[in-house]
Image (cartoon, coloured by chain):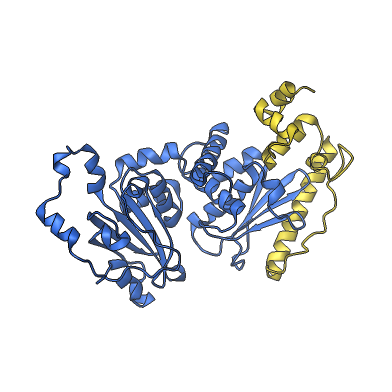
Chain colours: A blue, B yellow
Amino acid sequence: MTGNPDLKQKQLMRRAELVLQEHGLLTLPVDLDALAQAVGVHLREMDRRAEGVSGMLMRYGDQFGIMYATHTDNEGFERFSIGHEFGHYFVDGHLDHIPFDGGVHRSRAGFVSEEPYEREADYFSAGLLMPTSLIRPILRQAREGLPSVEAIRSEAKASLTASAIRYINETDDAAAIVVSRQGRVDYCFKSEALKQLKGQNWLRKGAALPTGTLTASVAARPAAERQGRREEAETDILDWFGGDRTARTVEQVVDLGRYDRVLTVLSCAEIVDDTYKDADDLEESDEGMESRWTPRFRR
Amino acid sequence: MSQAALAKDSGLPPSSIAHFEAGTRKPSFDSLRKLANALSVTTDFLLGRTDNPEGAAEADPLYRDMQKLNDENRRQAADFMRFLAEKHDREAAKK
């Protein structure tokens, strides 16, 4: 991807929103069949045994088609896969860069693709299924953290992880999401408000989950005990990202089931509230100061 | 045909047409189809895959890298490609 990645991401999401606007389809849940019909792209389900391939964009002359996977039994995943192939179709420049083998381009699943053009298609898909102008009003109504993520998922018919990433893109809350697998970080995103906190670390791919956190204890349980569970605890943002400032944080953990993955949503309302406080109110209490200067050990 | 006329007929912004002509930006597949319709040529002609403006699609060596898919998937992809090819031929015959 070229230039500023954040800007490029916003441009791709905006492009998706404009496509919907152009065809009068800017409502939730976005009607992908209607979009396919409007632009003359044929959609077809792939056999359920097609594990490993999430979708294919196919071309024969002037005719285009999208085949998409159904093996996950996850409507959000299917919709995201279709949106991804639409990304290859609608984003400028992809016709020269995506490999077509015999008129077929195949894509692998996942929101956080490594290859730049696959990542662009992912961003387009996220913007297509969850356009900013429709997501913002949902976030104004829903409570911060997991309830916001679930509200997006339900309205947009998107997967939980894709909804969580869109929540982080759009929220004014200080929040982060972490997707981990077998106790190791797959990826982590922070909201703009949280990025403003100085001195924080990033959780890199492959890093161990911070010990003593609810997520680490959930991840350590056998899969059968974890299955479908949702849990919540109060923590401190320092426990997750270090930094200079202590802040009460709600940690919400959801077992994603497939592939031993766990989603964590971290939200700290008090950081956003600071914007509206007087400078005097921001002075730390003795207790806060003591807590800040006490060496913290991972529990 | 002028850039303005092509923009009008294709429904694409004039600035995009200028970029495509100058080669400073590559179109999307969607834009390519809109341009092909406006110019009454095939997308393959615009892609430089055939010299005939109304020509049928260039024959691709189909499925040369399909080893990642199982036989059933390959069969389905081939079936879908045949559907697209028939659709293409029907549309071409109408023109």
Judged from this view, the residue extending furthest toward the bottom is A222
Quadrant location of residue B82? bottom right
Residue A17, image x, y percentages: 52, 37
Residue A107, image x, y percentages: 62, 58
A79 to B55, vertically: above or below:
below
Quadrant location of residue A252? bottom left
Q: Is residue B55 left or right of residue A79?
A: right
Viewer-side residue, A227 vs A103: A103
A281 to A45, vertically: above or below:
above
Please give the name of the residue rendered at 36% of the width and 49% of the height, measured from the top-left corner.
A195
A188 to A142, vertically: above or below:
below
Please give the name of the residue rendered at 76% of the width and 43% of the height, measured from the top-left corner.
A62
Quadrant location of residue A226? bottom left
Please give the name of the residue rendered at 52% of the width and 64% of the height, measured from the top-left corner.
A72
Q: Is residue B13 left or right of residue A244?
A: right
Residue B13, image x, y percentages: 65, 27
